[in-house]
């Protein structure tokens, strides 16, 4: 991920272990480009992405757990990648 003046200018996101193969998060990338993502935006994007996943259950994890883990790890990765911008709290207006 690349940021210029706090705005996302370039990103590529993929998750492994959340489906039969690697899953590209194209929608998340599209929604991030040009934005100054805050904690609320990141949480929403990660939640929406995970909700759309249909991971196969297996002997290691149930589908619901894989969805939960995908949301959590994506949210954490985006927060770390955006640095102070992504960890900023949403202000109540």
Image: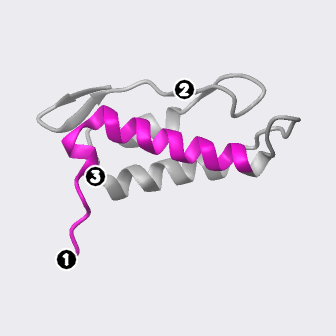
What residue does disc 3 label?
A: 38
Tell me if residue 74 is in the magenta stretch.
yes
Colouring method of the image: one colour
Which portion, as a residue range, is magenta? 65-93
- Label 2 SS: strand
Q: Do labels 2 and 1 touch, CB within 8 Å?
A: no
Q: Quadrant of residue 76?
A: top left
Q: CA distance from mark 2 to mark 1?
A: 34 Å
Q: Which label's residue is closer to the chain start, 2 or 3?
A: 2
Quarter of the picture containing the C terminus is bottom left
Q: Which label's residue is closer to the chain start, 2 or 1?
A: 2
Q: Residue at x 34, y 42 (%)?
A: 79
Q: Position of residue 30 (x, y in %)?
A: 42, 37
Q: Position of residue 13 (x, y in %)?
A: 48, 27
Residue 38 visible in the picture: yes
What residue does disc 1 label?
A: 93
What residue does disc 2 label?
A: 14
Q: Residue at x 45, y 56 (%)?
A: 44
Q: Residue at x 63, y 50 (%)?
A: 68
Q: Position of residue 51 (x, y in %)?
A: 64, 53
Task: Pick out the residue farthest to the front.
Answer: 60
Left or right, 8 with reference to 18: left
Q: Residue at x 69, y 28 (%)?
A: 17
Q: Main secondary structure of the magenta part?
A: helix
Quarter of the picture containing the N terminus is top left
Left or right, 17 with reference to 83: right
């Amino acid at each position: 991920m690349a940021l210029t003046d706090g705005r996302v200018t370039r990103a590529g996101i993929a998750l492994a272990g959340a489906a039969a193969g690697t899953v590209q998060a194209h929608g998340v990338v599209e929604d991030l480009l040009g934005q100054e993502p805050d904690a609320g935006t990141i949480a929403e994007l990660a939640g929406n992405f995970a909700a759309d996943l249909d991971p196969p259950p297996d002997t290691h994890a149930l589908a619901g757990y894989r969805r939960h883990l995908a949301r959590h790890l994506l949210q954490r990765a985006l927060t770390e990648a955006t640095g102070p911008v992504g960890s900023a709290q949403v202000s109540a207006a």
